[in-house]
Image: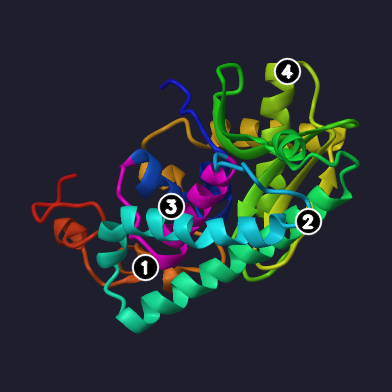
Amino acid sequence: MAKRVQSPSSINLFKTCPRKYYYVYVKGFELLPSIHTARGHVAHSVLEHFFDIDVTGITKENCHERLQGEIPGLLVKYWQENKAEFDGLGLSQQQMQFYFEETLVMLFNWLNHFVARVRKHPENDFAKVFKTLTPVREKEYVSEYYSVRGFIDAIEHAEDGVIVMDYKTSKTPVITPEYRLQLAIYSLLYQETHGVPPRKVGVYFLKDQAHFLNVDQDLIDMAKKEIELIHKGTQTEDITDYPKAPDKSPCRWCEFHEFCWGTKNGKSQFLGMPGMRKDGRK
């Protein structure tokens, strides 16, 4: 069987639970939507298109007030564009208002750090600074050699090298092993495409601040090792080759909990599964 094209998400899922990987990437079952995923997509859209705004009349002195005035409109625009997804979550109006306002606070927090970078820049012309600090956004990288792909949120070019960044709405501002692997894969993809690795990789934690990792050979080698391991572990479509997670602690929150650990047997256990039709077929 040909290698599947993996991603940081699929590799991290396989490391957490091979059985869930099987359901999602082999059988094609859909994951249930969540407010955290939905609003994360909206926040990413706002930050992607923030750099397309008209900066006429904005100066380094008034930029915080002017840029802050742009954020709510962008958030409303992309929140409304995702209305169908939000409506399907079954949340109350009060709950939706809470998540909307929380997302707005996150974006304002990110803006505070961006404005600080603007004001530290030696150039006085705001438009030039804004252009200089505008990253390459939502860039897809695909490696045929490694059979892996990834979407990089932001690629920043500084005088001393490239910095690859990801946006996270996580509660805890810590570069976890999962995030570290994601950033390692981005480093490998960038290096394969451009011939040199980025100088740094990092995460903009929208509730906190940016955290960085230096890119070294150990980070690149870790990405190569994990990619090799998942290709070795996903060569078949036999469910028995995809064991359940050894640690059941995350299972209670999983869409497939009853399927894995419940008492249902036979074809009936497919009924009502995410992404499944009532006849048990995808």
- The residues bearing labels 1 and 4 have C-alpha atoms spaced at a distance of 43 Å
Q: Which residue is pictured at 49% across the width and 62% down the height?
A: 72
Kindly identify which residue carries mark 1: 257
Q: Does label 2 or label 3 sit earlier along the sequence?
A: 3
Q: Is residue 252 above or below residue 246?
A: below
* Looking at the image, residue 145 lies above or below residue 57: above
Q: Is residue 42 magenta?
A: yes
Say which quadrant the N terminus sits in.
Answer: top left
- Closer to the chain start, of discs 2 and 4, is 2
Amino acid on which the number 3 mark rests in the picture: Arg
Residue 52 position in % (x across, y down): 55, 39
Type of the residue with mark 2: Glu
Q: CA distance from mark 2 to mark 3?
A: 55 Å
Q: Real-space Cα distance between discs 2 and 4?
A: 37 Å
Q: Which mark is residue 19?
A: 3
Q: Residue furthest left?
A: 279
Q: Which residue is mark 4?
A: 194
Name the residue carrying label 2.
Answer: 61
Name which of mark 2 and mark 1 comes first in the sequence: 2
Q: Residue 232 at what x, y percent from top left?
A: 56, 32
